[in-house]
């Protein structure tokens, strides 16, 4: 006799537990440490034996909630300055919960008309917000890596067609290597996408003017001239994560048009500069690109994972990501089939959170968010400049502040060792979260302000922790002075 599952009875208690935890967490998230000091040890202590007899939904969720008290990173809180992580606006969080509740498959109109329509609407709104031409095709992805993959897949398809080959069907065999030209600001996600596409990381030529990665435009044009019209891919970065620097997008667009290039712009967070009159010049000319990427879980402040890819020619996406089967809607279906123009076929309804936050706060709300973070970044810059033991390493163009702890008597080698240890100490301390990078040969801290909850007191706490822990590290380090 067929046995029924009693899991339906679990929902009431599950919902009660989750709602109670949500209320408690949101009530205190502004003051929670960025990471508990015992997070690593407690996480590694979680039993890993597969249960034969389960403990039940309610008991399991109670255990998960208890685990989260000391093992999660408070990436949704205002003191997480690591990477470039936004929080989740109230509307985005609500939309994301509903996406899980309704469990929509955003592959095609037939699988979820609502998820697909909200995606189309949200992407159109974002294109308008960023100044991207209205006739471009766009799609939601998991984040910058897959958005870069989409844009560069279109670029690879374009290069193949320039040479008379449909690379999605025939592959790259027999074609000359595809030249990829960029500055030193190229992001690791772009390199990963190039590797996955078979173009190769080693095909990238970084044409730089100095150790900061700044593009040498004169050398770039000379290299393009030497290609003699061979199709190539140019990559511009709008907001690199070490110091928030920008490549000259408008000039790259001119060169792409002149020298037969596909211009891909990685604007993971920097594209949002266009929302403020104070920073719009940084992304001027972006409409002259051929593909553009931007993240949602950064400055849009929607939950992980979410990204967007915008491409000038839909036919390139259709060729690159063709996906057919007898039981699936095909390319001639009268309604949209999103899974045939991007890498994912199984697609979560990310549009719920994106549409919800854009509808709730609008362009003006996001302009206020961006300008508030610009102000906070300048405030952090001023705090760094007024402290004798801190040194600003790069101009603050956007929301990233690149600086280091600098005892006066240390040389650069000692400073690099000190700041590396300091970065590790800050993460272990957990009151704030910020990582290290290397900028112009110097180990540095690079806090990024992108969470809608962040206030001046959070920035002040960051400076306090850096100075306090910096002094501790300073006293512990060898004194091998020159």
Image (spheres, helix red, strand yellow):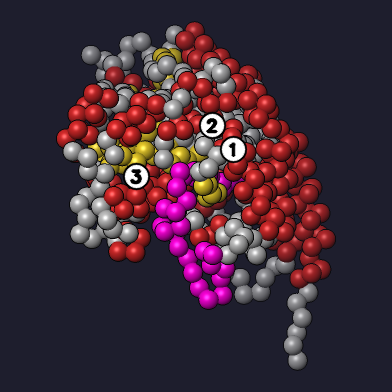
Work out how far the residue at label 1 is from the one at label 2, CA to CA, in angstroms: 8 Å
Q: Is residue 317 left or right of residue 111?
A: left
Q: Around disc 3, counting alpha carbons within 10 Å, would you say few (fewer than 14), some (14 to 19), or many (20 or more)?
A: many
Q: Is residue 340 left or right of residue 409?
A: right
The magenta segment: 303-332
Place of residue 176 in the rendered image (x, y in percent of width and height, measured from the top left): 20, 52
Q: Nearer the viewer, mark 1 or mark 3?
A: 1
Work out how far the residue at label 3 is from the one at label 2, CA to CA, in angstroms: 26 Å
Secondary element at tag 1: helix
The answer to whether residue 461 is visible is: no
Place of residue 267 in the rendered image (x, y in percent of width and height, measured from the top left): 46, 35
Q: Is residue 213 left or right of residue 326?
A: left
Occupied quadrant, residue 233: top left
Label located before the other in sequence (3 or 2): 2
Q: Around disc 1, counting alpha carbons within 10 Å, would you say few (fewer than 14), some (14 to 19), or many (20 or more)?
A: some
The tag on residue 70 is none
Tell me the quadrant of the picture where the N terminus can be found.
bottom right
Q: Around disc 2, counting alpha carbons within 10 Å, would you say few (fewer than 14), some (14 to 19), or many (20 or more)?
A: some
Q: Which residue is mark 1?
A: 126
Occupied quadrant, residue 216: top left
The answer to whether residue 123 is visible is: yes
Q: Which residue is mark 3?
A: 191
Identity of the residue drawn at 75% across and 61% down? 58
- Vertical placement of residue 164 versus 138, above or below: below
């Amino acid at each position: 006799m067929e046995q029924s599952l009693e899991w339906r009875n679990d929902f009431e208690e599950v919902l009660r537990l989750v709602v109670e935890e949500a209320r408690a967490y949101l009530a205190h998230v502004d003051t929670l440490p960025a990471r508990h000091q015992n997070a690593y040890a407690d996480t590694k202590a979680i039993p890993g034996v597969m249960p034969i007899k389960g403990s039940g939904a309610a008991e399991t969720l109670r255990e998960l909630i208890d685990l989260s008290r000391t093992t999660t990173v408070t990436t949704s809180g205002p003191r997480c300055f690591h990477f470039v992580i936004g929080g989740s606006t109230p509307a985005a969080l609500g939309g994301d919960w509903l996406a899980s509740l309704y469990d929509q498959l955003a592959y095609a109109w037939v699988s979820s008309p609502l998820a697909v329509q909200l995606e189309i609407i949200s992407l159109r709104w974002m294109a308008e917000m960023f100044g991207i031409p209205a006739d471009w095709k766009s799609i939601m992805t998991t984040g910058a890596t897959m958005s870069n993959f989409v844009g560069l897949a279109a670029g690879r398809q374009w290069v193949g067609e320039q040479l008379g080959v449909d690379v999605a069907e025939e592959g790259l065999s027999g074609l000359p290597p595809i030249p990829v030209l960029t500055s030193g600001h190229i992001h690791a996600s772009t390199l990963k996408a190039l590797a996955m596409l078979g173009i190769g990381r080693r095909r990238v030529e970084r044409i730089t003017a100095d150790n900061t990665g700044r593009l040498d435009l004169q050398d770039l044009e000379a290299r393009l001239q030497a290609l003699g019209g061979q199709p190539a891919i140019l990559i511009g970065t709008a907001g690199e994560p070490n110091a928030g620097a920008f490549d000259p997008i408008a000039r790259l667009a001119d060169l792409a048009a002149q020298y037969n290039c596909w211009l891909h712009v990685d604007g993971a967070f920097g594209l949002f500069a266009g929302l403020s009159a104070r920073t719009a010049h940084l992304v001027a000319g972006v409409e002259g690109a051929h593909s553009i990427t931007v993240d949602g879980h950064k400055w849009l402040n929607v939950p992980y994972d979410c990204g967007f890819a915008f491409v000038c020619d839909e036919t390139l996406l259709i060729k690159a990501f063709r996906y057919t089967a007898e039981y699936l809607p095909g390319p001639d279906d009268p309604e949209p089939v999103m899974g045939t123009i991007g890498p994912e076929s199984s697609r979560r309804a990310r549009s719920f959170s994106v549409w919800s936050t854009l509808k709730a706060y609008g362009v003006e709300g996001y302009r206020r968010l961006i300008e508030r973070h610009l102000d906070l970044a300048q405030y952090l810059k001023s705090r760094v400049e007024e402290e004798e033991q801190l040194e600003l390493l790069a101009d603050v163009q956007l929301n990233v502040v690149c600086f280091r702890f600098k005892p006066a008597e240390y040389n650069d080698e000692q400073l690099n060792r000190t700041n590396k240890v300091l970065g590790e100490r800050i993460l272990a301390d957990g009151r704030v979260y910020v990582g290290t990078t290397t900028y112009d040969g110097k180990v540095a801290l690079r806090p990024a302000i992108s969470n809608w909850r962040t206030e001046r007191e959070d920035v002040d706490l960051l400076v306090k922790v850096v100075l306090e822990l910096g002094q501790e590290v300073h006293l512990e380090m060898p004194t091998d002075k020159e």
